[in-house]
Image (cartoon, rainbow, N blue to C red):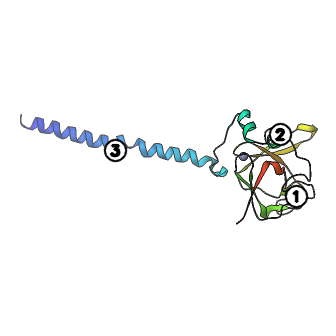
């Protein structure tokens, strides 16, 4: 009769001991799951989308920025700030500040718009655009969805691409 309580206590200890690792298990496994989910958009360099109402954008942007970035407008050639900018630095999204183009990839296209042969990987999205009766590829900021311009396949080596971008969609950060 004396062994029974001892055995019962031992059984409780055993069952607690076996519960502890089981109870602790969900924490690391759910963290692993989270990491797995976060790893998926790794190509986008952990870009978290910014969503604002059109009213919020209107307050933040100048009328010309709003017309181009939010209504897919185009600035007049040779009128923008950056088509003839030759300084070294990074071109960012004028709406959200995301790095978009490196001055090392800018070239003279003669079009009157800043032109680049590549983008900062994952920071730009491309969509088919059939407006104006043409098939073009629209270029947008990957973070805020702002319209930047279009990409054409008549650019220089090494990519053969020409990203034709509105100055008004960009903010230039000169290298210090
Ligand atoms: Zn943006």
Q: Residue furthest left?
A: 1
Task: Give the number of the mark in front: 2 or 3.
Answer: 2
State which mark lies toward you, 2 or 1: 2
Residue with the mark numbered 2? 67
Q: Is residue 57 left or right of residue 77?
A: left
Q: CA distance from mark 2 to mark 1?
A: 26 Å
Helix, strand or loop under label 1? loop
Q: Residue, x 85% and y 55% (percent of image)?
A: 114
Which residue is at a point 69% across and 45% down the rendered structure image? 143
Q: Position of residue 35 (x, y in %)?
A: 53, 47
Q: Residues within 10 Å of mark 3 (few under 14, many from 20)?
A: few
Q: Which residue is mark 3?
A: 21
Residue 81 placed where, x, y %?
84, 54
The residue sitting at 80% across, 62% down in the picture is 105
Q: Is residue 109 left or right of residue 57?
A: right
Q: Quadrant of the C terminus?
A: bottom right
User: Element under label 2?
Assistant: helix
Q: Quadrant of residue 68?
A: top right
- Residue position for label 1: 155
Instruction: Specify few, some or many for label 1: CA neighbours under 10 Å numbering under 14, 14-19, or 20 or more.
Output: some
């Amino acid at each position: 009769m004396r062994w029974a309580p001892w055995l019962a206590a031992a059984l409780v200890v055993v069952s607690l001991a076996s519960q502890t690792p089981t109870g602790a298990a969900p924490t690391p496994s759910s963290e692993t799951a989270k990491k797995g989910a976060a790893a998926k958009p790794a190509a986008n360099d952990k870009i978290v989308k910014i969503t604002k109402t059109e009213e919020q954008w209107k307050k933040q942007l100048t009328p010309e920025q709003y017309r181009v970035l939010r209504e897919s407008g185009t600035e007049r050639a040779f009128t923008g700030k950056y088509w003839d900018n030759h300084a070294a630095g990074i071109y960012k999204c004028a709406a959200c500040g995301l790095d978009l183009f490196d001055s090392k990839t800018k070239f003279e296209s003669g079009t009157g718009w800043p032109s680049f042969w590549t983008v900062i990987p994952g920071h730009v999205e491309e969509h088919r655009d059939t407006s104006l009766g043409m098939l073009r590829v629209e270029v947008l900021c990957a973070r805020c969805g702002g319209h930047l311009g279009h990409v054409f396949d008549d650019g220089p080596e090494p990519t053969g691409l020409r990203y034709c971008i509105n100055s008004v969609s960009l903010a230039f950060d000169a290298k210090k």
